[in-house]
Structure formats: structure tokens, C-alpha cells
Image (cartoon, grey):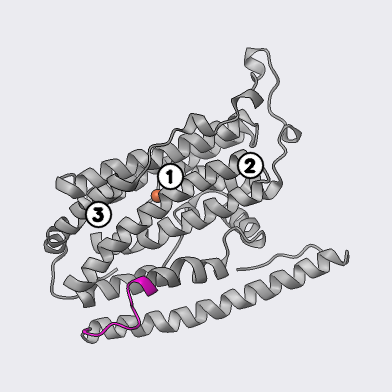
Amino acid sequence: MTSTGTTAPRHLLEDLEPVVAANLDRHLAIAQEWHPHDYIPWSRGRDFAMLGGEDYSPEQSELSDVAKAAMFTNLLTEDNLPSYHREIATRFGRDGAWGTWVGRWTAEENRHGIALRDYLVVTRGVDPVELERARMDYMTTGYDSGDKTALEAVAYVSFQELATRVSHRNTGRATDDPVADALLARIAKDENLHMIFYRNIVAAALEIAPDQTMRAIADEVIGFEMPGATMAGFRRSSMIIAKAGIYDLRLHHDEVIMPVLRHWNVFGRSGLGPVGEQAREELGTFLAALDEQATAFVDRRAEQRARQAAGSDRPQVIVS
Ligand SMILES: [Fe+2]
Ligand SMILES: [Fe+2]
């Protein structure tokens, strides 16, 4: 992706340092300590065969197939943390407030993977062999966002953190298990604070380098992909997740992209040059198409659900 405008990326990172420092302090003041072990129903756990117990089989869990698919996808996504750490550490650096944030964020994210894994293994929510093989495969491949600048990366994560918040929250509701729901709601809270941190940095960047930042925002919205998109079976899982309404195009447009854009006053702000105006126009065109796609998806899903309710359904695939 290209970066435009007059401020060089390194210069912009330095200009944003005080904003990062202030938002780091804000984050540390409001983030509440929590512990994964408090959210795990340990009494439901037992040994596997190697220690004389029983190995996994699907009927041991009361989770629905939808909840299993969503939790499996969410956990694997969290598991690829070393790649995400590399992504932000190489772009934001290890010095000063940027570096402190990188470390703190990484530590918080690691907690999500720990908690989800403990829950799923203790409750036998997923096949632990399948899970481990998938983790090895996905982490070996790693995650690579390409050649994003630091500014593009901050714009991307503003949306991505909110997307994971929505996804975790709605997964919790889909589990029908109050323990999983409480755990996923707790994780979703963290994701929301992460979103706010990044969103505030982009808001400051819009003041410092409006054209360059608007270009980055447009590029990241238009090219948005979930970090888990490269994991094996993601397309199938994301279809299940979308059909269940855990994360779909409507939620992506209404609850992820638009609230963040509104917060930045993207479509109301003045002071853009030709580069920024062009980017904003492209963004507007893209969003109109996204909104249409979202409506079409929800309509098809409603039709399919109606057919299923009427008992006359043939297997259908909803293409997002
Ligand atoms: Fe997370
Ligand atoms: Fe996060």
C-alpha cells in the first residue's frame, strides 16, 4: 500500500508519541486486573487416556457446533500472537510509550489465548488433538499483514480490535453456557479498550497528517481482512459464524466500521487536500457497496432460516 502526504512515517510516529503516552496512562488507569483461572470450570475437567482417563469425543461437550466453530476460530486467532507482536513491534518500535504499549498489549492478548484454551480443554469443548495440530499449522505459517506502514497498521487495528470484541461477545451468547459467556464478555472488554487506544491514536493522526491518515483509513477499510483469514478452514468457519449472526457483513458494517468512522468524523471533517478527498470518496463508494452486500446477505439468511423452519430446506450455502 502507498503512503501519501507530507509527513514521513517515522516523523509521524514521533509526533504521535505524546498521544501514545497519554493513552497508555489512560489505559493503565482503567484496565482492571483479571485472572483466567477464575473463569474456568475446573470441576468439569478430568484426565485424558494417557493418564488413565478418557480421550475426547464430541458428545462430551454441550456446546453447539456453531459455538465450537466460533470458539475454535477465536482461540486460534488469539494463538497467533507472536506474529501480531512482530507486526506491531517492528512498526511501532520498542522505545518509549510505543514500546511500553507493545509489551502491555501483548501480555493482555496472551491472557485471551490462555483462558480460551483452558476453558475448551477442561470442558472438552473441542478435540484437543485437532486443536493442537491446527495451532501448530497456523502458527508455523504465521500472520503477515504485508507492507503496511505504522499509520496503516494503527488504522487497521482500530477496526480489528472492535471486530474481535463483537465476535467474542456474540460467541459468548451463542455458547448457552454462562461460564463461557462471562469469560468471552471479559475478553471482549479488553478488546474494546484496545480499540479505544488505537482509535485515539488515529484521531490524533488525522489532526497531524489528515490526507495521509484518510488515505490509510480508506485503504484499511477497503482491504479489511480478519487476522484469522489465513488459517485452515477459515472460509468454512467464517460461513458458520456469519450464518449464526456471530459475525457477519451487517455487524461488520454497522457495529465495527461505521462507529469508528463516525468517531473520527470522517465524513464531516474539513481541511482535507486532494489526496484526502479522493480517499474519502473511495471510502464512501466502498461503504455503500458493503451496505448493499450486507443487506443481501441478511435477506438470503432470513430466507434460508424460513425454509429451514418450514422443514423444506435443501442444503444451502450462503456466500458472503
Ligand atoms: Fe484478544
Ligand atoms: Fe485486543
Magenta-span inclusion, residue 117: no
Quadrant of the image for the N terminus?
bottom left
Q: Is residue 26 above or below residue 281?
A: above
Relative image position of residue 37 (x, y in whole percent): 50, 29
Dominant SS type (magenta): loop
Say what amino acid the circle numbered 2 marks.
Pro
The disc placed on residue 178 is 2
Task: Give, as a single range, the part of the protein colored magenta.
Answer: 262-271
Tell which of 143 and 205 is nearer to you: 205
Picture residue at 53% right of the left edge, 55% below the top = 167
**Which three-letter amino acid code belongs to the residue tagged 1?**
Thr
Is ligand 1 within 8 Å of the beta carbon of the residue shown at mark 1?
no
User: Which of disc 3 and disc 2 is earlier in sequence?
Assistant: 3
Q: Disc 2 and disc 3: Cα gap in Å?
A: 33 Å
In the image: residue 8, left or right of residue 53 = left
Task: Determine crowd level at label 1: few under 14, some 14-19, many 20+ residues with C-alpha closer than 10 A.
Answer: few
Whether label 2 touches label 3, CB < 8 Å: no
On the rendered image, what quadrant is the C terminus found in?
A: bottom right
22 with respect to 161 (left or right): left
Which callout, 1 or 3, points to the residue nearer the camera?
3
Dot 2 beta carbon under 8 Å from ligand 1: no
Q: Which residue is mark 1?
A: 141
